[in-house]
């Protein structure tokens, strides 16, 4: 088996398309190259993810000696970002071709979230004054109950009036 011949069939480059009737004799219909890149819908979200991963790369650099840390981190960061950019497609476009602006779907999602927040705040504006009023009423009633239960601790003495004050001046 060590000396068994291996059959190597050269394949056309990935970018090449096969056309029926071409000289190579292939009878496969014209197909575009298969895209093995990770499909994403938002360049903005991907950029945020790259920034998040960048922080982890910086933490990994803490283990390196000081004299090579900065160039090594710069190199690793550039390599990582380049690899991600080359292996990602944004709405079927390469990283460089994709626009940074909001897509219609992003705007629609943001509008929906904004509408939900508006409804939530409007609901709270109606509910909270009633709840606050209930709490204020309960607090006032509790204070009144506490005041009703208050009795003075010192009992006043009954003083008797003496008609003749000269008796005590001697």
Image (cartoon, rainbow, N blue to C red):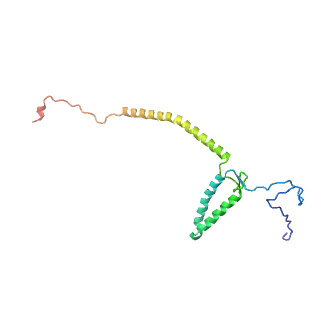
User: Foreground: 119 or 165?
Assistant: 119
Q: Residue at x 65, y 46 (%)?
A: 106
Residue at the top extreme, as displayed: 163
Q: Quadrant of residue 138?
A: top left
Give how far across and how far down residue 18 sits, in percent.
85, 57
Give how far across and how far down residue 135 sits, in percent.
46, 35
Give how far across and how far down residue 42 sits, in percent.
67, 51
- Position of the N terminus, as image quadrant, is bottom right
From the viewer's perspective, is 45 left or right of 155? right
Report the number of discs. Answer: 0
- Position of the C terminus, as image quadrant, is top left
Residue at the left extreme, as displayed: 170
Above-or-below relation of 62 to 145: below
Q: Residue at x 60, y 63 (%)?
A: 60
User: Foreground: 93 or 28?
Assistant: 93
User: Foreground: 51 or 149?
Assistant: 51
Q: Residue at x 71, y 59 (%)?
A: 86
Q: Quadrant of residue 10?
A: bottom right
Give how far across and how far down residue 78 sits, in percent.
65, 63
Q: Residue at x 64, y 45 (%)?
A: 107
From the viewer's perspective, is 170 left or right of 135? left
Q: Quadrant of residue 68?
A: bottom right
């Amino acid at each position: 088996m060590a000396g068994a011949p291996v059959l190597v069939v050269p394949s056309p480059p990935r970018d090449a398309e096969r056309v029926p009737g071409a000289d190579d004799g292939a009878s496969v219909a014209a197909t575009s190259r298969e895209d093995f890149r990770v499909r994403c819908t938002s360049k903005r979200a991907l950029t945020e993810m790259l920034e998040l991963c960048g922080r982890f790369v910086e933490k990994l650099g803490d283990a390196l000696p000081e004299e090579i840390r900065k160039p090594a981190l710069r190199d690793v960061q550039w390599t990582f970002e380049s690899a991600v950019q080359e292996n990602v497609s944004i709405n079927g476009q390469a990283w460089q071709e994709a626009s940074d602006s909001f897509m219609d779907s992003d705007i629609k999602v943001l509008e929906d979230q904004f509408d939900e927040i508006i409804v939530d705040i409007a609901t709270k504006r109606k509910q909270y004054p009633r709840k606050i009023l209930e709490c204020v009423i309960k607090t006032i009633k509790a204070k009144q109950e506490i005041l009703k239960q208050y009795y003075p601790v010192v009992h006043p003495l009954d003083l008797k009036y003496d008609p003749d004050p000269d008796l005590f001046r001697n």
